[in-house]
Image (cartoon, rainbow, N blue to C red):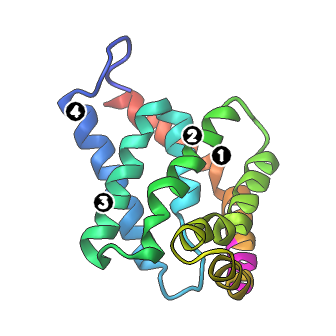
Amino acid sequence: MTTKGRRGLGVRDSVLLGMLGALMFVLKMALAWLPNIEPVSLLIMVYMVVFGWKGLFCVFVYVGLEYMVWGFGLWSACYLYVWPLLAVLTMVFRRMKSPLGWAVLSGAFGLSFGALCSLVYLVTGGWAAALSWWTMGIPFDLMHCAGNFVAAAVLFAPCKKTLMKLTKQI
């Protein structure tokens, strides 16, 4: 990254990370016709491994774009903690080399997405609302799990390698 040894984000880093956050949103929209198949999980993991904690900037750009386009509701409140949670988990495992390990992490995150999002309904509607919301979404969580697993297994290593190469050129 261009700010090695400095704290905070410079203009160049802000622009780069902002564009990468926007790229996450655009790619998600391009795949919106597929139920719960999204590139966001993969890209958050790649960004966090390549950029470290600065990758959170991409996450919040993505979440901000989601809110600007779709508005804010109970369904979207979880984005404020779910995507940053994946970023934190990625930082915990950032030294992992195995593509299978990244695929398992991404798949497990996809499988748990509905349960994590149901916490909003737990606070706003109680146990019954949270449990019913989560259980109705289990088929989508299974698709999310499978899509995340395959995407990370196939694309994590090449995306990481390419992004590292590109950022060294900047």
Magenta stretch in the rendered image: 139-144
Q: Looking at the figure, which quarter contains the N terminus?
A: top left
- Where 113 falls versus 129 (above or below)? above
Helix, strand or loop for the magenta stretch, by majority = helix
Q: Residue furthest front?
A: 126
Q: Amino acid at mark 3?
A: Gly
Q: Position of residue 64 (x, y in %)?
A: 30, 60
User: At 43% across and 66% down in the image, what residue appears?
Assistant: 77
Mark sitting earlier along the chain (3/4)? 4
Of circles 3 and 2, the one toward us is: 3
| Residue identified by numbered label 3 | 64
154 horizontally vs 1: left or right: right
31 horizontally vs 69: left or right: right
Q: Amino acid at mark 1?
A: Ala
Mark sitting earlier along the chain (3/1)? 3
Of circles 3 and 1, the one toward us is: 3
Secondary structure at numbered mark 3: helix
Q: Are marks 4 and 2 in contact (CB under 8 Å)?
A: no
Secondary structure at numbered mark 2: helix
Q: Are marks 1 and 2 in contact (CB under 8 Å)?
A: yes
User: At 59% across and 85% down in the image, what residue appears?
Assistant: 35
Evaluate whether residue 62 shows in this view: yes
Q: Position of residue 131 (x, y in %)?
A: 71, 79
Q: Position of residue 103 (x, y in %)?
A: 75, 55
| Residue identified by numbered label 1 | 157
- Where 53 falls versus 33 (above or below)? above
Of circles 4 and 2, the one toward us is: 4
| Residue identified by numbered label 4 | 12
Of circles 3 and 4, the one toward us is: 3
Mark 2 closeness class: few <14, some 14–19, many ≥20 residues within 10 Å: few
As drawn, the label of residue 161 is 2
